[in-house]
């Protein structure tokens, strides 16, 4: 992850991309794994994960007593739209 | 003069179409992602499009009603003013944080001189504000290009730069009214708008679907 400033949207994009492309196992990614990949604090990621689960973008599962997160179909659609419009905004020199 | 009317009509219609299309795509992006940046782009390009169509309406209605080549100045000023709001939002997207004075007293005093001067003067003032905002937007976009190195970014920067140059020539035209500067100004602006349209051609719209559940995302 780069050390430059990331917007809230960019962090959400990073979390969803990780849960889609870089899952450590089929049950999903743990909070610790996501913290490492998305490079944000526990408090902040907990809030974001709560929002993403409540919006149906992530699915929460229990595996071996630990909470794990996987991207849902709605999350995949959102991520596709995010990537498309991220490029669009980028063309205007802006960050989504 | 008839050629000038024709060229200005083309500029205003191209401006309206480009504004509405980019505004619509930004709005689709905003609906799908909830991004504030895309919301600002939506407002910016819709207002730019509306500004162009106001100018076209003013010019065309005047031509139809009175057969006059020179349109009503207040309608042109209104159109330019609405466009400037759009340019402000483009510049604002590049994080202009404080554009207006914070004190309400300063704001009211700042508005007062607008009632003392003619529409022609207001049009010139608004044009110069547009010019500053467009130059600022172009410079910020060039800076973004150095970070991302995306080719479309440099085209958008060139588009904003061309619009700024067009505004500058349009303002200079008041000093030399009989020169070809207005023709060059309009052509430059049309080129700028076409360059702004380039990123739209890169959006694979057929793959994007609306999802009503994502409204609050």
Image: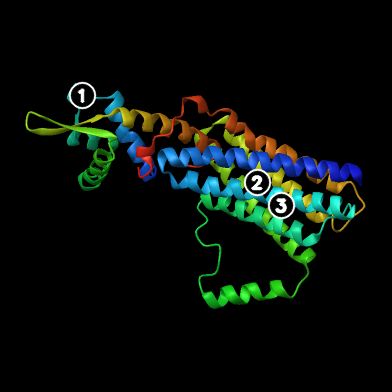
User: Is residue B19 toward the left or the right of residue B98 in the image?
Assistant: right
Name the mark on residue B54.
3
Q: How busy is the neighbourhood of tag 3: few (under 14 within 10 Å), some, or many (20 plus)?
A: many
Q: Secondary structure at mark 2?
A: helix
Foreground residue among B39 and B130: B39
Residue A33 in the image, given as x and y percentages of width and height: 20, 32
Q: Secondary structure at mark 1?
A: loop
Q: How far is the residue under mark 3 from the one under mark 1?
A: 57 Å
Question: How is this picture coloured?
Answer: rainbow
Asked if badges 1 and 2 are on one and the same chain, I answer no
Q: Kindly identify the residue that appears in the image at 55 percent across and 78 percent down.
A: B105
Residues marked 3 and 1 touching at CB (< 8 Å) = no
Name the mark on residue A24.
1
Name the mark on residue B128.
none
User: Is residue A60 toward the left or the right of residue B105 in the image?
Assistant: left
Determine the chain carrying the residue at label 2: B
Residue B141 in the image, given as x and y percentages of width and height: 57, 42
Q: Secondary structure at mark 3?
A: helix
Residue B213 in the image, given as x and y percentages of width and height: 35, 38
Q: How busy is the neighbourhood of tag 1: few (under 14 within 10 Å), some, or many (20 plus)?
A: few
Vertical position of residue B111 compared to residue A9: above or below: below
The extreme front residue here reads B65
Q: Residue B158: which quarter of the image?
A: top right
Which residue was labeled with disc 2? B49
Residues marked 1 and 2 touching at CB (< 8 Å) = no
């Amino acid at each position: 992850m780069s050390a430059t400033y990331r917007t809230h949207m960019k962090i959400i994009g990073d979390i969803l991309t990780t849960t889609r492309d870089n899952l450590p196992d089929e049950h999903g990614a743990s909070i610790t794994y996501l913290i490492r990949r998305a490079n944000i604090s526990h408090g902040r990621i907990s809030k974001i994960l709560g929002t993403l689960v409540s919006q149906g973008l992530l699915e929460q599962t229990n595996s071996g007593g630990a909470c794990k997160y996987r991207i849902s179909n709605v999350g995949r659609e959102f991520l596709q739209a995010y990537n498309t419009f991220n490029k669009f905004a980028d063309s205007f020199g802006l960050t989504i | 003069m008839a050629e000038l009317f024709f060229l200005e009509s083309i500029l205003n219609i191209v401006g309206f179409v480009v504004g509405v299309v980019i505004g619509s795509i930004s709005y689709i992006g905003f609906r799908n992602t909830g991004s504030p940046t895309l919301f600002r782009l939506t407002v910016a390009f819709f207002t730019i499009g509306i500004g162009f169509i106001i100018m076209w309406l003013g010019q065309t209605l005047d031509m139809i009603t009175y057969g006059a080549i020179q349109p009503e100045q207040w309608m042109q000023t209104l159109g330019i003013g609405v466009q400037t709001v759009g340019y402000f939002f483009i510049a604002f997207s590049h994080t202009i944080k404080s554009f207006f004075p914070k004190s309400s007293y300063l704001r009211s005093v700042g508005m007062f001189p607008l009632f003392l001067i003619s529409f022609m003067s207001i049009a010139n003032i608004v044009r110069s504000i547009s010019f500053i905002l467009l130059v600022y937007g172009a410079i910020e976009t060039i800076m973004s290009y150095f970070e991302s190195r995306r080719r479309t970014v440099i085209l958008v920067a060139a588009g904003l730069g061309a619009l700024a140059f067009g505004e500058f020539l349009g303002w200079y035209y008041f000093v030399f009214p009989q020169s070809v500067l207005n023709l060059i100004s309009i052509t430059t602006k049309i080129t700028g708008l076409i360059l702004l349209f380039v990123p739209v051609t890169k959006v694979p719209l057929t793959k994007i679907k609306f999802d009503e559940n994502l409204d609050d995302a």
